[in-house]
Amino acid sequence: MSGAPAGRSLWRHGDFLRYWSACAVDVAGSGVTGVALPLIAVVSLHATVWEVSLLSFAERLPPLLAALPAGALADRHRKRPLMIGAVLVCAVAFTAVPLADAFGHLSLELLYAVALVTSGASLIGSTPRISYLPSLLPGERLLEANAKIGVVSSLADSAGAQLGGAIVTILGAARAVWCDVGSYLACALLLGSIRTPEPAPDPSTRKGSMRTEIADGVKYVVGHPTIRPLLLTGTVYTGVFALVTTLWDVYLLRDLSYTARTLGTLLSVAALGGVAGALAVERLVDRYGPARVMLTALAIAPFTEVPLLLAAPGRTGQVAIAAGLFVQLACATAQGSTQRSIRQAVCAPGMQGRMLATGQWITYGTRPLAALLAGAAGTWLGLWNTLALGTAALTIPFLVLLASSIRTMHHIPGSPAASRPPRPEGEPA
């Protein structure tokens, strides 16, 4: 491991910068596609609420099907080749969208197929990418690294969404997808340029069958006293949030009559909230502890949806929604970086890939079901009523974490703060 010394800035760690840049380029390109694909479906192909929910279902199904094998693969093999191969598959798959548009064959069925393939490839790549970080840096630098990655990811997402709105306006939604294709190719080059030798996989991970390894990963996560409650909270949060976000684009584009540029601007402002959360999380955790940071972020989440429910078409509504989304992404990034750092710090090295994959399977497995539920509820109850129910349900993750033992955690295990001896009674902090 080529870890940066405790007092040395990660900005001077060359391989971390390459890893960090690869994440930024990837997210920026995905930000463009995040604006383009809904517009293709809703505006160009006139998709219904149910058809939009099927697109969301296709994007969110792979974690339910392939997360567990992806984790076993990440622990069995070197992670960098998996990461590079996955982004190249995404690049090839996304070329189908602008090419089909150029030849007049663009359809919802094609979008469903592309969404399914790219989401599956992204899963195969993201599992080793996230679990690769502990082999690149020492444990005490993980929160700092995750915060820095959170900052650049949010900035890139913001830039990508803003750029996506402009490119879609100029070139059209389908041709804008070329930007994402280019971002995947750049990401592959950056990941390929990392020089730090990757430790060989633990030979013990190959002693059993793939099924045995997967089962061991599930047992490890379910039986871990720290990881289990974090994933339970994340599962509830992700499921409810997936229901709400499935309907955002349709509600904004149809009910509130927002344009592509306005949608891109809103997503851009929301991503900047992620920057704020990533910049603040280290100091907040150091001062208040990880439990308070996560609980506070989850408690605020339902209130950030209220502007969306109350807004009317026009500039005032846009500003209110943007403010709500800004705070929402700040809270989501702060609590996400914190819980991810905790899980990475407490997990055994040989279980990092399977821990992450099991978490994705449990947590993200709710998203395709939530997407279908959103489509059905949005069709039968109406978009506004479904969004209101989802907003109320966002209170549940807070209650789940509050009921767990994590609520008493004052420091991230393995961090410098956790290793400090307790101060004598009466000594000032």
Image (cartoon, helix red, strand yellow):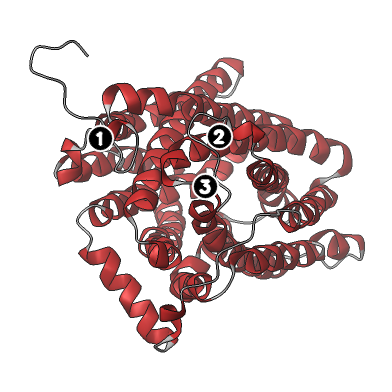
Image mark for residue 137? 3
Q: Circle 2: is it few (<14), some (14-19), or many (20+) Cα within 10 Å?
A: many
Q: Residues within 10 Å of mark 3 (few under 14, many from 20)?
A: many
Sequence-wise first label, 2 or 1:
2
In the rendered structure, the answer to whether residue 407 lies left or right of residue 61 reads left
Residue pictured at 52% horizontal, 27% vertical: 273
As drawn, 402 above or below 211: above
Residue under the point 47% across and 28% down: 277
Q: Secondary structure at mark 3?
A: loop
Say which of 109 and 142 sits in front: 142
Q: Position of residue 76 (x, y in %)?
A: 51, 76
The C terminus, quarter of image: top left
Alpha carbon of mark 2 to alpha carbon of mark 1: how far? 20 Å
User: Residue 122: x, y in percent?
Assistant: 61, 62
Q: Which residue is mark 2?
A: 148
Marked residue nearer the N-terminal end (2 or 3): 3
Q: Secondary structure at mark 1?
A: helix
> Could you give the CA–CA distance between mark 2 and mark 3, rounded to whole angstroms?
13 Å
Residue type indicated by callout 3: Leu
In the rendering, which numbered label is found on residue 312?
none
- In the figure, residue 200 lies in which quadrant? bottom right
What residue is shown at x 50% (from left), y 40% (from top)? 146
Residue under label 1, please give it. 291
Query: What amino acid is found at the position of numbered circle 1 in the picture?
Result: Ala
Type of amino acid at the residue the image marks with label 2: Lys
Percent x, y of residue 317: 54, 20
Q: Is residue 346 left or right of residue 315?
A: left
- Please state, as top left, top right, bottom left or bottom right, where the N terminus lies in the image: bottom right
Say whether residue 404 is visible.
no
As displayed, is residue 242 above or below residue 24? below
As drawn, the residue found furthest toward the right would be: 103
